[in-house]
Image (cartoon, rainbow, N blue to C red):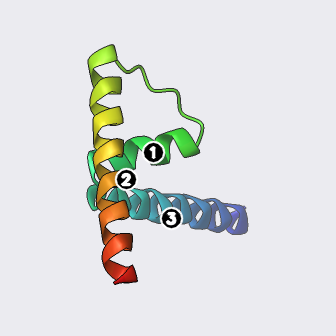
Amino acid sequence: MDRARQHMRAIAEAMEADAEERRRRAASMTALERIVEGLRLGHALPLTDAQLEALDRRAEQQADIHRKWRALQRR
């Protein structure tokens, strides 16, 4: 019985460590990165039209920055 408790305690500790790592990683992400990560993990996000438009604008801004950066690299 004691061995089973140790096993369950080890599982609980591993789960808590995993949850802590996810919280730490999420804290270092931007809002857009958290949304993309959630979508990657299959979470459905209830976004309003305004939020979707803001995401589209942000994605376009990021793509523009990337295009400019690549153009500078080619020089």
Q: Quadrant of the N terminus?
A: bottom right
| Mark 2 surroundings within 10 Å by alpha-carbon count, few (fewer than 14), some (14 through 19), many (20 or more) | few
In the image, 36: left or right of 52?
Answer: right
Q: CA distance from mark 3 to mark 2?
A: 41 Å
Residue type for callout 3: Glu
32, 45: nearer the viewer: 32
Residue at the image point whose x is 37% and y is 62% from the top: 67
Looking at the image, residue 49 lies above or below residue 39: above
Circle 2 residue: 63
| Mark 1 surroundings within 10 Å by alpha-carbon count, few (fewer than 14), some (14 through 19), many (20 or more) | few
8, 16: nearer the viewer: 16
2, 43: nearer the viewer: 43
Contact check, label 3 and label 2, Cβ < 8 Å:
no
Say which mark, if any, is on residue 13.
3
Q: Element at badge 1?
A: helix
N-terminal label among 2 and 1:
1
Residue 18 locus on image (x, y percent): 49, 62
Residue type for callout 1: Val
Q: CA distance from mark 2 to mark 1?
A: 15 Å
Residue at the image point whose x is 27% and y is 30% from the top: 54
Say which mark, if any, is on residue 46.
none
Residue type for callout 2: Ala
In the image, 17: left or right of 48?
Answer: right
Q: CA distance from mark 3 to mark 1?
A: 28 Å
Residue 7 locus on image (x, y percent): 67, 66
Q: Element at badge 2?
A: helix
Looking at the image, residue 19 lies above or below residue 73: above
Q: Quadrant of the C terminus?
A: bottom left
**Which label sits in the foreground, 3 or 2?**
2
Q: Quadrant of residue 51?
A: top left
